Amino acid sequence: MARLIYKIAPVTDTPAIVVRRLTKSYGPVEALRGLDLDVQRGDIFGFLGPNGAGKTTTIRCLLDLIRPDGGTARVLGLDPQADPVAVRARVGYLPGELHLEDNLTGRKILRYFSALRKRKVEWGIVHSLAERLHLDLDRPVKNLSKGNKQKIGLVQALMHRPGLLLLDEPTSGLDPLVQQEVLALIREAKADGTTVFFCSHIMSEVEAVAERVGIIRQGRLVEVADTAALIDRALHHVKVRFQAPADGNALDGVPGVTVLAHDDAQNFTLQVEGEMDGLIKALAAFPVISLETTRPTLEDVFLAYYQADDVAAEDT
């Protein structure tokens, strides 16, 4: 299968996306509440949050599909409100709710999008993408499954080799093998200098490809961090089996370590916040038979953020 080659983005210190104090309301509902966000060029950035957190609203403001009530946004150095055509020409966009003309084939739909982009699309790239995604371009949309419609959306986002990809739930409706192919395409785009900004509910795929993630809650950005660093500072669970009875207080007193349970004085379940170094040094004083560590996933981190916020809200 042919590898998709992207146009190398110009070298610049200007971030691909800059958002400052962005606000947007739908009647009484505040979708964005002073959002600040920077995405550097060439990054793969995962944008995480539950339904209604403001993810899709952010993307639509970046493309001038809707107008914010306040604040500013810049996309590849351009103002989407002042020059939306130029922005969309440089961006590949896959909406979360994709609507296609039922009576057209995939090929005709892609030719339509090509015409909108002044026919700057190379059809060899279209055919390569269709082959890699196992997409039949000549079937009417009305005869396609949700997953195959999603593939058309992916091809139209990728086919003009944009400098920035805005992907809202890119693997929705796809089978696992095609999901992996989409992640490979995202990695290839990044390798060739394209910036990728995507929302997903599938935490494992965000963890697999995103170098940085932003967590949005109720229209505000609550965290931005390197994916690995965010996971590493989360809670680990550790199961320890000692050869002889051990003093649980000695373990509970280690900074960052909490004894969650022990069947007897030889089998302990521990929770460790942050680095494991202190626990390892404490365990050196005991004869250990086995040690099992469960590394947190990005989903664990994400849920911990929202559970903590929910508890705080209940206490106020």
Image: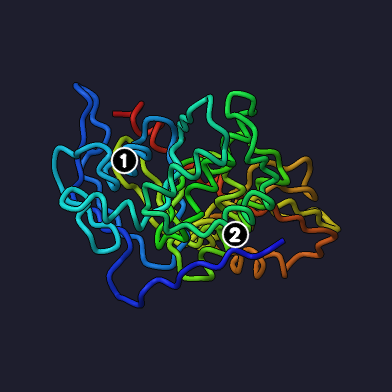
Asked if 55 appears above or below 146 in the picture, the reply is: below
User: Where's residue 214, x and y in %?
Assistant: 40, 51
Q: Which residue is mark 1?
A: 60
Q: Nearer the viewer, residue 210 or 108?
A: 108
Q: Residue furthest bottom?
A: 11
Quarter of the picture holding the C terminus: top left
Q: Amino acid at mark 1?
A: Arg
User: Where's residue 82, x and y in %?
Assistant: 15, 51
Q: Nearer the viewer, residue 153 or 176?
A: 153
Numbered badge on residue 190: none
Q: Is residue 239 left or right of residue 224?
A: right
Numbered badge on residue 124: 2
Quarter of the picture holding the N terminus: bottom right
Between the residue at mark 2 and the residue at mark 1, the CA separation in whole angstroms equals: 30 Å
Q: Is residue 234 left or right of residue 29?
A: right
Q: Is residue 137 left or right of residue 93?
A: right
User: Where's residue 267, x and y in %?
Assistant: 78, 48
Asked if 17 appears above or below 303 in the picture, the reply is: below
Camera sees residue 256: no
Total labels: the figure holds 2
